[in-house]
Amino acid sequence: MTGWLNTHSPRTFEQMAIPDKPRQALLAASVSADPPHLLITGPVGVGKTAAWRLVARQVLGSGWRSTTHVLQCRDLVRQRGAMKTFEDFLRPGGNPGFPRDTLAGRLSLDAFDRGMSTGSPDDLAPAGEETEIAPGFLPVSRLIVLEDADHLGSIRQAYLRRMMETVGNRLEVRAGG
């Protein structure tokens, strides 16, 4: 990860250098009890990675790093067995041969109890306060992030679109315009 992203990245939605409409859409989605699937688009350098990190921190709480699973789709380009790698990553049961490279293998106890991880005193929620979880409601326990999804190719993009359309609601945010 680049040094800039770790040291100078925005820590709140207000600090994002994007137009107000996409900022408010990200904020509203991240504080929702049932957040939508997000498709964050824009050219290189507009803050897509910073945006999903803020959403992940707000949705998952201070343990977001252990319950956010990232697949760099650019790495799948022209790779033998790329579709299987993609499917195995998304498969909740995982791949018995590579359990640590699947969502099941990367599952953290933080997914079951948000109170397990306590952030540092300067780790503030990007929306200004933690999202309240109603009693009896099961909050989102983990996020799947597909970086550079445009490198997936048409077959995998269609597979992903069908998945996003059939499970839950969806919100597209254009970070660069």
Image (spheres, rainbow, N blue to C red):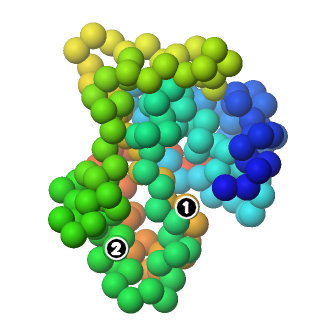
Residue 174 coordinates in the image, percent (x, y): 66, 52
Residue located farthest toward the top when viewing the structure as drawn: 135
Residue at figure coordinates x 77%, y 40% from the top left: 7
Give the left or right position of residue 136, taking residue 4 as reference: left
Pick the front one: 14 or 105:
105
> SS at mark 2?
helix
Residue at figure coordinates x 26%, y 19% from the top left: 137
Among the 4 quarters of the image, the one containing residue 35: top left
**Mark 2 crowdedness (10 Å alpha carbons): few <14, some 14-19, many ≥20:** some
For residue 85, the mark is 2
Residue at figure coordinates x 47%, y 78% from the top left: 76
Residue 38 coordinates in the image, percent (x, y): 50, 48
Nearer-N-terminus badge (2/1): 2
Give the vertical position of 122 relative to 14 (above or below).
above
Q: Is residue 166 visible?
A: no
Residue 1 coordinates in the image, percent (x, y): 67, 55
Give the left or right position of residue 142, taking residue 95 as reference: right
> SS at mark 1?
strand
Q: How far apart are marks 2 and 1 (CA)?
A: 15 Å
Q: What residue type is labelled 1?
A: Glu
Residue corresponding to mark 1: 147
Among the 4 quarters of the image, the one containing residue 101: bottom left
Q: Do the residues labelled 2 and 1 touch (CB within 8 Å)?
A: no
Pick the front one: 91 or 26:
91
Residue at figure coordinates x 55%, y 61% from the top left: 147
Pick the front one: 28 or 52:
52
